[in-house]
Amino acid sequence: MIPFVSVARPALGAGPLAGLAAAALVVLLAGCGQSASGPSVPVEVSRDTSCALDGMLLADFPGPKAQIHYVGADKPDFFCDTVEMFSLYLKPEQQKRVRALYVQDMAQTDWDAPQGHWIDAKSAFYVKDSKKRGSMGGTLASFAQEADAQAFVAKNGGTVLRFDQVTPEMVVLDGGALHDKRM
């Protein structure tokens, strides 16, 4: 037989802190078992890591890569270009809750075969309209430091932007087909 333990409980409303304590307990318990919504760390790409949008292998293309970590997901979505990440993230119909965004610091890795050096995308500096190309053609080169972004501009042209200055119009993935008057 299982022993029964009786616990005396105060009547409802028996103290000003009772409601606060109950609310705090609910908040604490709500977080149990949800490790996928905790802090995330960037995941390194492998030779077979493919792009979430088009299935292209990230390792086959030059330029900065990106990853989006969603709340409740075990693995991030990878992108073979920062333009793809921004294109998806900035869509008004984007409904998934984002936990973290990472891009590569191109001052620390090789443009033609970037590896590692992941940084928080929201704190990065971006160069648009440079002569360097990524998997989608023109790209947004990402940097951890503004001085590195400015040095890149001096060598390759372009304009330095912050994350919140990138607009949906800058990251359209139509390949120019919508603007081709010959079609």
Image: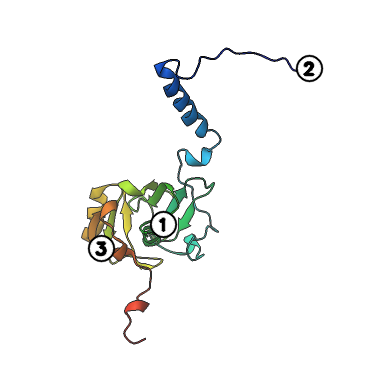
Rendered-image quadrant of the C terminus:
bottom left
Circle on res. 1: 2
Q: Amino acid at mark 2?
A: Met
Q: Give the residue displayed 26% in from the left and 51% down from the top.
A: 148
Mark 3 or 1, which is nearer the eye? 1
Say left or right for 87 vs 2.
Answer: left
- Dot 3 or dot 1: first in sequence order is 1
Label 2 CA crowd tier, 10 Å (few <14, some 14–19, many 20+): few
Q: Residue 32: percent from the left, percent from the top? A: 54, 33
109 or 182: nearer the viewer: 182
Task: Kindly state the secondary structure of the residue where label 3 is placed.
Answer: helix
Task: Kindly state the secondary structure of the residue where label 2 is placed.
Answer: loop
Mark 2 or 3, which is nearer the eye? 2
Which quadrant of the structure image shows residue 171? bottom left
In the rendered image, is residue 4 in sight? yes
Q: Amino acid at mark 3?
A: Asn
Circle on res. 94: 1
